Image (spheres, grey):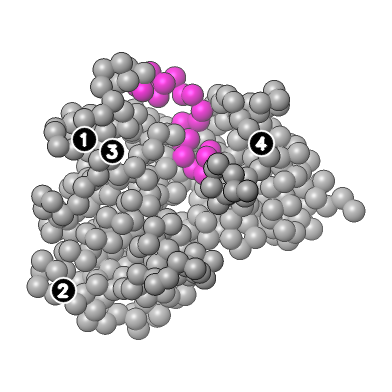
Amino acid sequence: MIPSVLPTYNRAPLAFVKGEGAWLTEADGRRFLDLGSGIAVNALGHAHPALVKALTDQAQNLWHVSNLYVIPQQQALADKLVDASFADTVFFTNSGTESCELAVKMARKYFYEAGQPERVEILTFDGSFHGRSSAGIAAAGSEKMIKGFGPVLPGFVHLPFGDLDAVRAAITDRTAAILIEPVQGEGGIRPVPDADLKALRQICDENDLLLILDEVQCGMGRTGRLFAHEWAGITPDIMMVAKGIGGGFPLGAVLATERAASGMTAGTHGSTYGGNPLGCAVGSTVMDHVADPAFLAEVNRKSALLRQKLEGLVADHPDVFEEVRGAGLMLGLKCRVPNVDVVRAGYDNLVITVPAADNVIRLLPPLTLTDEDITEAFTRLDRAATAVAAP
């Protein structure tokens, strides 16, 4: 008999009942160090006092009205995002998947309005992940994502990761945009080199293409800059964000230049819940923290300390780990043993990590984790590695 919750998840046998900072308490009372943050969502950790206050204060006044009306909290968050980024305008969604849908629509609508309706193709890359909607799985193109869900939405051209020559060769008079994650998350914590991002920006400029960046996982301070592309000194035309922007509340957004968004006029897109007062009150508070240069400086300091500990872990367990990869507090451990074995050993040692492709485990801790948390992370991961390596 099928369970009441559709069985599409391979869940760990853990049920958490309380969180505080980088720590989760299981129903049986055990305390786990959370290096997953709900897959890079809880940017300020669990039950951050400022987020609790923002949500509580807003909940006592107004939850939802729909986008038929002006929403002051939405305007305030949009202004903060525009002031802190390349963007001229913002559309709010509930998730990264919804942000992907709009980014694809926006790029195609731009060329339609420009009198080039044939320009619908978007170049994407192996190992990418852009959500699980029809557009998202078509953009990723992997057999795992699309098998059984045909017909697959057309208009995406899949290219090898890191192959700029393949990008140039794939451009035709039907090409509209390039879509890429500055750091692949689900694909195994694979950063795109700064030089490659610069080259992609140049390729787009030379061929009148739009550059779409998916910063759903790598944005909102996770790499030590507010947005990961800032390290390369470039700007996109369209950018998808979600996860960390809500600090645990379902919230996403598409940021765009005025030019890229010019086709999106009244009636071309909408969302019932997107940008509601509750979500935007929380998101605005998240922005107040993660956009602060002092906060980002601490992310960079802590990421260096964590990476140093992880390099030592790899050196101590060369039969279990191959390398450390990633940027900021978006780090991965490439494993020599099955990564799921390491994740399960972590559960036994009360530390949470997240599996990814390329036999990698992801470490996506709250950006607020302490130095003591980092030391404890090493201790617990060391025990997990020792358990995996034991005959």
- What is the CA distance from the residue labelled 1 to the residue labelled 2? 32 Å
Residue name at image x 45 percent, y 43 percent? 222
Q: Which residue does the numbered mark 2 point to in the structure image?
A: 117
Q: Which residue does the numbered mark 3 point to in the structure image?
A: 273
**Horizontal side, residue 343 vs residue 173: left or right:** right
Vertical order, 108 against 17 (above or below): below
Label 2 vs label 4, nearer the camera: 4
> Quick one: SS at disc 4?
loop
What residue span does the magenta drawing correspond to?
A: 37-55
Give whichever of discs 1 and 4 has the lower sequence position: 4
Q: Which residue does the numbered mark 4 point to in the structure image?
A: 14
- What is the CA distance from the residue labelled 4 to the residue labelled 3? 30 Å
Who is closer to the viewer here, 114 or 375?
114
Q: Identity of the amino acid at label 4?
A: Leu
Q: Identity of the amino acid at label 2?
A: Pro
Q: Identity of the amino acid at label 1?
A: Ser
